[in-house]
Image (cartoon, rainbow, N blue to C red):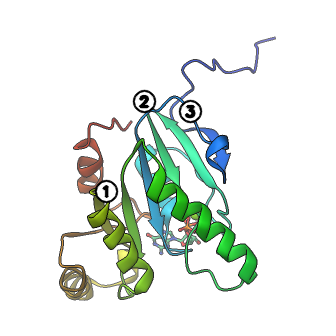
Amino acid sequence: MASKRRPSNPPAKGDLAASALAATEMPAEGLPEFAFLGRSNSGKSSLINGLVGSKVARESQTPGKTTRLHFYRMSEWYLVDLPGFGYAKRSKADRAFFGQAVETYLTTRQPLLGGLLIQDCRRDPEEEEAMVVQWADESNRFLVVVANKMDKLNRREQGERLRALENAYGRQVLMVSAKFKEGLDPVRSAIRGLGLRLP
Ligand SMILES: Nc1nc2c(ncn2[C@@H]2O[C@H](COP(=O)(O)OP(=O)(O)OP(=O)(O)O)[C@@H](O)[C@H]2O)c(=O)[nH]1
Ligand SMILES: [Mg+2]
């Protein structure tokens, strides 16, 4: 019978390499990392799956499901799915802890090149999104801003929301539908521009 064991060196693209809260649980090889940030339910995991081309990240039916930092092994880098911020139903103590794990990761993690901030295109950026932009500016890290769920709007509304969001962020915003895999090429190009290979 064929062995079910997959070769572990190197792991297949998109393999979950670590599910971590503390730095000691994170990959230690020092490979570049690129993080997906955004409010809970904004579509981080769905976008990751769309970009990687297979179902690697777990998509939630219940918001706030991604509670740890998930490290997915890509070719010579790690894609990091972060717990969503702004999820109100969790206890205060938990929220502080998850918030703390993400904050420590963002501010101290050496191999972190930058991130992708994803938000629902129907919403305006709020304090959390502003904090992510500030983090990227202050720590000199690359940031791509993505507005997801464009399939919820008609073409005219899409144009209006794109203008409003680019105005609010003062930078380029990429409109996508993670669900229908629309608008993903510019997102891929931005990530590849960092020298990170995608399938
Ligand atoms: N209509 C539509 N729904 C989407 C899209 N992207 C994601 N969703 C839905 O939104 C919900 C949340 O998606 P996830 O990818 O799990 O969101 P997440 O940001 O990873 O959420 P957390 O892990 O809880 O932080 C799921 O029900 C998805 O099916 C999209 O482009 N269009
Ligand atoms: Mg998720």
Would you say the beta carbon of the disc 2 residue lies within 8 angstroms of ligand 2? no
Q: Nearer the viewer, mark 2 or mark 3?
A: 3
Quarter of the N terminus within the rendering:
top right
* Residue 152 visible within the image: yes
Mark 3 highlights which residue? 28
Label whose residue precedes the other's in the sequence (3 or 1): 3
Q: Which residue carries the number 2 mark?
A: 75
C-alpha span from label 3 to label 1: 30 Å
Rate crowding at label 1 as few (under 14), some (14 to 19) or many (20 or more) other CA atoms within 10 Å.
Answer: some
Question: Rounded to the nearest whole Å, what is the CA distance between mark 2 and mark 3?
Answer: 16 Å
Residue type at mark 1 is Leu
Q: Secondary structure at mark 3?
A: loop
Instruction: Kindly indicate the quadrant of the structure image that contains residue 184.
Output: bottom left
Is 153 in front, or is 39?
39
Q: Residue furthest right?
A: 1
Q: On the picture, is 94 further left or further right than 49? A: right
On the question of residue 149 being in view, the answer is: no
